[in-house]
Image (tube, grey):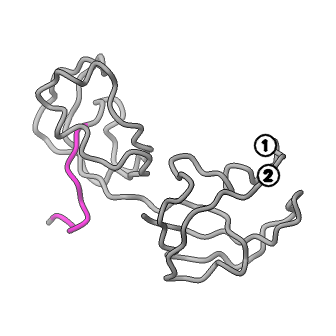
Amino acid sequence: MEHSDTIITLIGEKQAKVGNEFIFRGGAKECEGCKLKKTCLNLNEGGKYRITGVRNTGKHDCFVHDSGVCAVEVIEAPVELSVESRKAIKGSTIIFEPLSCRFSSCEHYELCHPPGIKKSDRLTIIDVGNGIIEPCTEEYILKAVEIKR
């Protein structure tokens, strides 16, 4: 039985494995004339997805994926992010404002600037980690949270 948050989309056959996660980056120029683009491009650009099922519908030719594409079931996967401790409240909705940081080599930089999340995105905090992320070279007091759009 399909979960209500499940989306059917097409993905490269080589990537179509249950449990794989990916960030949808949008369509390529080659997708413009494709008859399947509405099914392939039905995800939110920048969204993180987890494959929960692979449909046995065969493979379809694709201008981008050399081995073709196949139908998969995906759900939007939670994204881990660091926020200032005072904003880390489970169930709250925040507007993402990237922290001002000059240290792109910091071990937590990607947690503070996660791929696929853009400034002003509305995010719901679905879980809050227990500990404070340390050390922050910019001296923020940060907590790791899981979010969804």
Q: For the point 54% across and 67% down, which residue is it?
A: 95
Q: Amino acid at mark 1?
A: Ser
The quarter of the rendered structure image containing the C terminus is: bottom left
Q: Are marks 1 and 2 in contact (CB under 8 Å)?
A: yes
Q: Is residue 117 magenta?
A: no
- Residue, disc 1: 104
Residue 62's x, y, as percent? 22, 21
Residue 26's x, y, as percent? 36, 36
Asked where in the image residue 22 lies, by quadrant, the reply is top left
Examine the rendered structure and indicate whether residue 105 appears above or below residue 117. Answer: above
Q: For the point 19% across and 49% down, which residue is it?
A: 8
The quarter of the rendered structure image containing the N terminus is: bottom left
Q: For the point 30% across and 16% down, which residue is it?
A: 66
- Mark 2: which secondary structure? loop
Question: What's the mark number on residue 147?
Answer: none
Residue 14's x, y, as percent? 34, 29
Q: Residues within 10 Å of mark 2 (few under 14, many from 20)?
A: some
> Whole-Å distance between the Cαs marked 1 and 2?
7 Å
Residue 25's x, y, as percent? 41, 38
* Labels 1, 2: front one: 2
Question: What's the mark number on residue 101?
Answer: 2
Q: Nearer the viewer, residue 38 or 52?
A: 38
Q: Amino acid at mark 2?
A: Cys
- How many dots with numbers? 2
Magenta residues span 2-10
- From the viewer's perspective, is 36 left or right of 82? left
Q: Residues within 10 Å of mark 1 (few under 14, many from 20)?
A: few
- From the viewer's perspective, is 18 left or right of 86? left
Q: Is residue 5 magenta?
A: yes
Examine the rendered structure and indicate whether residue 45 appears above or below residue 124. Answer: above
- Mark 1: which secondary structure? loop
Q: Nearer the viewer, residue 20 or 82?
A: 82
